[in-house]
Amino acid sequence: MTNRIQTIILGISLLLISLTWSWFVIKTIPPGYGDGEIGARIFPLTFGMLLGALALLMLFKELLTPKTQAEVNFSSDQLQNLPSNSLYWIPAIIVMLEIILYGFLLEKIGFVLATPLVIILVMVLSLKIRSIKKILIMSFGLTATCWIIFEKIFGIYLANGLWINLG
């Protein structure tokens, strides 16, 4: 499979994910209360729309770019000698487990505790960062910044834990 076909398949897949995500956000998260108030669904819906826009941009760029002569003249022997683009399964599984863990911890211990714990885990396991100073600054700085922006400035309530509630 050529890079052009892979890019088109990826663009279509990302567009479908974006549409599905946005539809679920609209169906499950209620809008804000009152006129002009930012509700809880604005943030995930914006991400869904950004993903869709970037997927469309990728598709249009790939479809409007003319094929090169090298792509048109592939023989079956040349196609067999191309390197395969395989997925690295272990990192993909680790990232999926980190996402599942974050969802679980978010419900049980809330945003304020779950976010720095998962950031520390991601930095150590996935990014292989060993600097204690960097890990602490990133985990607590990102958590505090998100908490200030969403909870205090926008007034969007972040998850409180069922086990521990630091709200």
Image: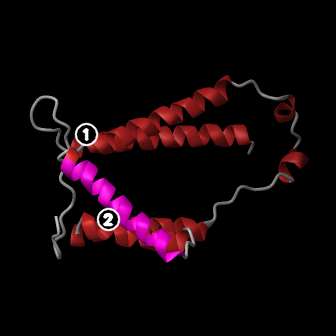
Q: Which residues are magenta?
A: 131-152
Give the image location of residue 151, x and y in percent.
20, 52
Q: Residue at x 75, y 56 (%)?
A: 84
Give the image location of residue 17, x and y in percent.
44, 44
2 or 1: mark nearer the eye: 2
Q: Amino acid at mark 2?
A: Gly
Indicate which disc residue 26 carries: 1
Q: Residue at x 33, y 66 (%)?
A: 115
Q: Please, is residue 73 above or below residue 88 in the view? A: above
Q: Please, is residue 41 above or below residue 107 in the view? A: above
Mark 2–mark 1 Cα distance, whole angstroms, equals: 20 Å
Quick one: quadrant of the C terminus? bottom left
- Residue 144 included in the magenta stretch of the image: yes
Q: Residue furthest left?
A: 34
Q: Is residue 30 left or right of residue 50?
A: left
**Mark found first going from the N terminus, 2 or 1:** 1
SS type, badge 1:
helix
Q: Please, is residue 69 above or below residue 91 in the view? A: above
| Residue at image mark 2 | 103
